Image (cartoon, rainbow, N blue to C red):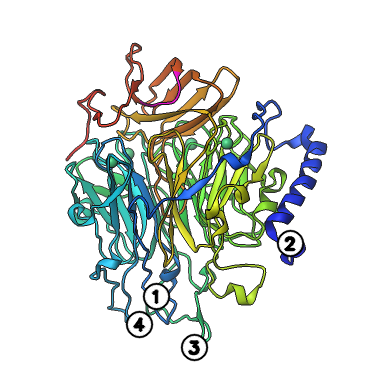
Amino acid sequence: MTMLLSGLRGRRVATLLWGLVSVLWCIQSQGQSPFPPKLPTAKPMNPAQLRFTDVAQKLGVDFRHQPGLTSQKYIIESFGGGVAVFDFDNDGRPDIFFANGAAIKDPASSSDRPEKTDPTFWNRLYHQEKDGTFTDVTAKSGLAGEGYSFAAAVGDYNNDGFDDLYVTGFDHNHLYRNNGNGTFTDVTESAGVGGSGLSSGAAWIDYDNDGLLDLIVLRYVQWEFTTPIRCGTPQGRQFCGPENYPPTTLTLYHNDGSGHFSDVTVKAGLADLKIKGLGVDIGDYDRDGWTDIFVANDNWPQMLLHNKGDGTFEERGVLAGISVDEHGHTYSGMGIDLADYDNDGWLDLLIDDLSFQRYSLYRNNRDGTFTYSSSTTGLAQITAKMAGWGMRVADFDNDGLKDIFVAQGHVNDGIDAQIPSIHYRQSPLIVLNTGSGFQDVSTTAGAVFQQQWDARGMAIGDLHNTGRLDVVVSTNDGPARVLRSDLSLPRHWLSLKLQGTRSNRDAIGATVTVVTADGNRQFATVKTSGSYLSSSDERLHFGLNDQASVARIEVHWPSKIVQTFANIPADRVLLICETSDPSFHPLDRKLDVRESRCLTGRKGNR
Ligand SMILES: [Ca+2]
Ligand SMILES: [Ca+2]
Ligand SMILES: [Ca+2]
Ligand SMILES: [Ca+2]
């Protein structure tokens, strides 16, 4: 397939192949369809009505990622930085954080450390104002950071109602406690989560369901500035791939509830796990009540860390059928998302990678295993030449079916000269879920899809509370993009913010089923993880197509409390408090109304 495609224009070919594949599908769909046969058919639509516009400059988001490029092509210069979309001041309007690089000595010795002394290297926090524009509040917030930063992971670890921020980096990670007054305090040392080595993705997860968020932190490879491996030639250095370096380990931190975390990697049975990790996501794929962990590894088997419920994990990637692609090949896993794309109530897995590897979609077989479904859904053909990083599976056109948005760009900045059909800078990708396959609608979705970026981090969220999912992209050595969704379809939607009282306050790990009268059934997990080095809006977004109300909402909390609600009107943001009181009804969350109405008196700390 890759040979056939190499001399041709990707998307046109993909469209042709799409037709071919569709025919093949019809032939085999009676057997192993990657979509359930009774899925409600989406209403006919004009894809041109889903459009994204880059409003970064217009809204005052002037972040530019600075990788600190050297002549040495140190591996960290190719990582890019993560994005976090989160409402740090609880005013109902999502804000944006960007992780940034740092100045690197050229060449650097073993004692040299990247520096953020120059403000162009600062991490940046942008506060959203009432008029929808953003103001750089980095200096006041105390989030400028130290060293070379990669991932941003949002979670309210101390359950005080203000989201905290974990930022990974080279050599040292940082935990910033949100003080609730617009400032953050670096509590890394007292919390014991500084880590070491070349960290990459991180995710908040309450793996033991005790109501306190724990933390999983990946590393990439064993690497130091003095690692004597260089790629390319002295005159033309290239970034070395992960195959040049030994694999490394991850760290699992247990939240002890006193502001301190314990490194439980050994106790959890994860100390011997060798990874080349980039993306990480969480979700209960087997619905046993314990949240599991998925790791996207670069040029290394992909991994499923099954939570055994006794504080230990078991790596089951091979058993579950997600470690390699359909041909048994490993690939360069970068971005990751666990999401139920076929609306059957079971989490599926998508991992993106480099050109000629095709993005890997694994459909959950509901028995602890997955089936590689990229080819049968058309996604393999669409993504054959693409290279993806930040990525989320979500309903961008509000028709009740989850779509895919990918921030793209190749890692090798010399690739254009080596393989003329592959480009270093690539357009982003928007793929719609039709209910029977995936369709690339990028060419009709706005001018940003004609632009070529070296994209890396990406987070999604309904920035202006209009019921449309926007996308924020960070590009390596380039400007940030705020892609406002200008979806013009008059489709209904519902946004749910869950607040735990016995469970962790962010409700991370809670699952929600939304059923509409037309028979559509959607399933989602509360999380901030997924994508690449990034953290998305924790509110759950549901597209409802032409349904003006939801027939039934079912919420399963990590505490085992189950809440159900009937006949809920659409087109609003609702706050659901965790309670066993059957008289509780979701609260309509107006802007500027602080969430003081949920029950208080829970465990936590300040
Ligand atoms: Ca805010
Ligand atoms: Ca916990
Ligand atoms: Ca599980
Ligand atoms: Ca959709």
285 and 460: which one is in front? 460
Q: Which mark is residue 234?
A: 3
- Residue at image position (45%, 68%) is 78
546 and 306: which one is in front? 546
Q: Amino acid at mark 1?
A: Leu
Q: Quadrant of residue 218?
A: bottom left
- Mark nearer the viewer, 1 or 4: 1
Residue carrying label 2: 5
Residue 465 is a magenta residue:
no
Q: Residues within 10 Å of mark 4 (few under 14, many from 20)?
A: some
Magenta region: 569-574
Q: Earlier in the sequence, mark 2 or mark 3?
A: 2
Q: Residues within 10 Å of mark 2 (few under 14, many from 20)?
A: some
Q: Amino acid at mark 2?
A: Leu
Q: Which mark is residue 106?
A: 4
Residue 570 is a magenta residue:
yes
Q: Position of residue 89 (x, y in %)?
A: 24, 40
- Do residues under tags 1 and 3 come within 8 Å of each other at their CB atoms? no
- Mark nearer the viewer, 4 or 2: 2
Q: Which mark is residue 69?
A: 1
Q: Quadrant of residue 449?
A: bottom right
Q: Earlier in the sequence, mark 2 or mark 1?
A: 2
- Do residues under tags 4 and 2 come within 8 Å of each other at their CB atoms? no
Q: Earlier in the sequence, mark 1 or mark 3?
A: 1
Is residue 414 visible in the rendered image? The answer is yes
